[in-house]
């Protein structure tokens, strides 16, 4: 009896396979569709709008706050630009009590091409530096500093603070001076950079692992503070290109 059921089941499966294989395949005979833009279905939720409006107004008021004034348009340029010069010099000014030797900022760290002449708002500095990068003081030897300058040359120039003098040609470093002196490989230099560069970002491997101090301030906040200080003293911004990095043709 079990054999009978077994044979019957096998016959059933065979018939089922035959019927299925002879069945015509299904296909889409017709299709219709409409495109609906999200603006066509967008409805304001009055309750949510009322809830967030105070925060929106507060944030907008903060971002529109004027914190300084520039007499000139500050551009991000290579090998040297007025915007980069200003940023580095503000950083050096802020940490002057630490007696740093120099400040370096990677060109990609400045996220807008320029700050136009006139009022400088809080929001503009947030546009310039939208990321929460912190400040670090590194202790690097002359060899590491020379390697950093070579990297800057290979990138066709980055913002550097006053006192740095580099000559580059076809993305190669020709000469490097700091405060009028050649780089001493046995000397230790105090370098201020973002935590991004300190951790080896943007190919700055030579900086990774260097002895350092976490200055526990955001890059952006330092700029805002120093610009506000200039505003209180009624000092107008007038940064220029000074020949910190010169490209030899």
Image: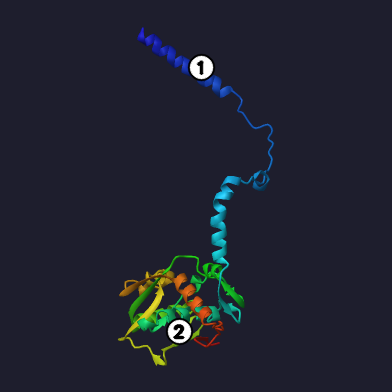
| The N terminus sits in image quarter | top left
Q: Residue at x 51, y 82 (%)?
A: 233
- Secondary structure under badge 1? helix
Q: Residue at x 55, y 19 (%)?
A: 19
Badge 1 crowding class, 10 Å Cα cut-off, few under 14, some 14 to 19, many 20 or more, is few
Q: How is the image coloured?
A: rainbow
Decide which of 83, 152 is in the foreground and name it.
Answer: 83
Which disc is residue 236 wearing? none
Could you tell which of marks 1 and 2 lies nearer the N-terminus?
1
On the rendered structure, is 191 left or right of 242?
left
Disc 2 marks which residue? Answer: 173
- Secondary structure under badge 2? strand
Disc 1 marks which residue? Answer: 15
Q: Residue at x 51, y 17 (%)?
A: 15
219 in relation to 175, above or below = above
149 in relation to 10, above or below = below
Residue 217 in sight from this viewpoint: yes
* Distance in Å between CA atoms under marks 1 and 2: 82 Å
Number of numbered discs: 2
Quadrant of the image occupied by residue 26 = top right
Q: Nearer the viewer, mark 1 or mark 2?
A: 2
Give the x, y percent position of residue 80.
53, 82
Quadrant of the image occupied by residue 83 = bottom right
Decide which of 184, 230 is in the foreground and name it.
Answer: 230
Badge 2 crowding class, 10 Å Cα cut-off, few under 14, some 14 to 19, many 20 or more, is many
Decide which of 184, 214 is in the foreground and name it.
Answer: 214
Decide which of 2, 59 is in the foreground and name it.
Answer: 59
Give the x, y percent position of residue 133.
43, 68
Give the x, y percent position of residue 92.
43, 81
Give the x, y percent position of residue 146.
38, 83
| The C terminus sits in image quarter | bottom right
């Amino acid at each position: 009896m079990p054999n009978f059921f077994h044979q019957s089941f096998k016959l059933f499966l065979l018939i089922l396979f035959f019927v299925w294989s002879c069945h015509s395949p299904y296909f889409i005979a017709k299709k219709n569709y409409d495109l609906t833009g999200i603006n066509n279905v967008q409805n304001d939720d009055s309750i949510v709008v009322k809830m967030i409006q105070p925060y929106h107004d507060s944030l907008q008021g903060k971002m529109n706050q004027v914190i300084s004034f520039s007499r000139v348009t500050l551009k991000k340029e290579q090998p040297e630009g007025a915007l980069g010069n200003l940023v580095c010099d503000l950083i050096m000014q802020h940490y002057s009590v630490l007696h740093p030797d120099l400040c370096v900022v990677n060109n990609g760290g400045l996220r807008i091409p320029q700050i136009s002449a006139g009022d400088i708002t809080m929001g503009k500095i947030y546009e310039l530096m939208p990321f929460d990068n912190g400040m670090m003081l590194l202790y690097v030897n002359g060899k590491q500093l020379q390697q950093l300058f070579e990297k800057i040359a290979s990138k066709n120039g980055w913002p550097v603070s006053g006192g740095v003098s580099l000559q580059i040609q076809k993305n190669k470093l020709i000469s490097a001076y700091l405060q009028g002196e050649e780089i001493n490989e046995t000397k230790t230099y105090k370098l201020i950079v973002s935590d991004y560069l300190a951790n080896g970002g943007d190919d700055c491997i030579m900086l990774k692992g260097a002895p350092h101090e976490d200055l526990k301030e955001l890059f952006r906040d330092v700029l805002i503070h120093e610009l506000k200080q200039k505003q209180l003293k009624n000092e107008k911004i007038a940064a220029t290109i000074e020949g910190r990095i010169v490209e030899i043709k």
